[in-house]
Image (cartoon, grey):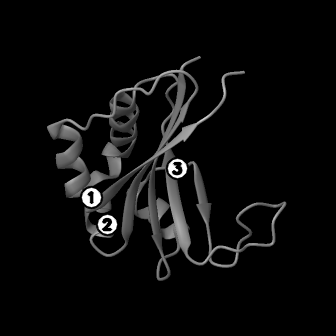
Amino acid sequence: MEFKISVSFRLAGIDFNPEEITALVGIIPSKTWKIGDLIDPRSSIRRKCNGWSLESKLDKSTNLDEQIKSVFEQLQPGWQSLVEICARHDALIDCAIYVYKQVPAIHFDKDIVRKATELNAEIDVDLYFLPDD
């Protein structure tokens, strides 16, 4: 294995309820959290904001651009509502790339940039270089 890629769309803020976001967009998220929730059950660190997240369902060996496009496709049924919601809350396309042998291409075509802009979303890419098992 050369790399694993994980992509999600996230909304974060203090003044929204994740269940209301789900109802407004009509999409079941991969994960939600509220202020005060534990970040991890093995930790005592608590969330400082509310959140709503939808993860790519593609295999982790799929290229970054395809993963992002897959997330956008999942968001499509609630797109117009999301555009309005994202104007008021922090939106993020969160990309994590775990590199074992070779760094995959990191490319955002015009369609990805346009859609991220429509959602007023930042794009974050974290690279983690790991030993090959």
Q: Quadrant of residue 42?
A: bottom right
Quarter of the image where the N terminus is located? top right
Q: Earlier in the sequence, mark 2 or mark 3?
A: 3
Foreground residue, 6 or 30? 6
Q: Is residue 64 visible?
A: yes
**2 or 3: mark nearer the eye:** 2
Disc 1 on helix, strand or loop? loop
Q: Separation of disc 2 and disc 3 at Cα?
A: 17 Å
Residue highlighted by disc 1: 119
Q: Quadrant of residue 88?
A: bottom left
Q: Separation of disc 2 and disc 1 at Cα?
A: 6 Å
Q: Is residue 37 left or right of residue 51?
A: right
In percent of width and height, residue 104 lies at: 41, 26
Residue highlighted by disc 3: 28
Q: Are marks 2 and 3 in contact (CB under 8 Å)?
A: no
Q: Is residue 22 above or below residue 5?
A: below
Q: Is residue 79 left or right of residue 102?
A: left
- Kindly give the residue lying farthest to the bottom in the view shown: 15
- Kindly give the residue lying farthest to the top in the view shown: 1
In percent of width and height, residue 77 lies at: 33, 45
Q: Which mark is residue 51?
A: none
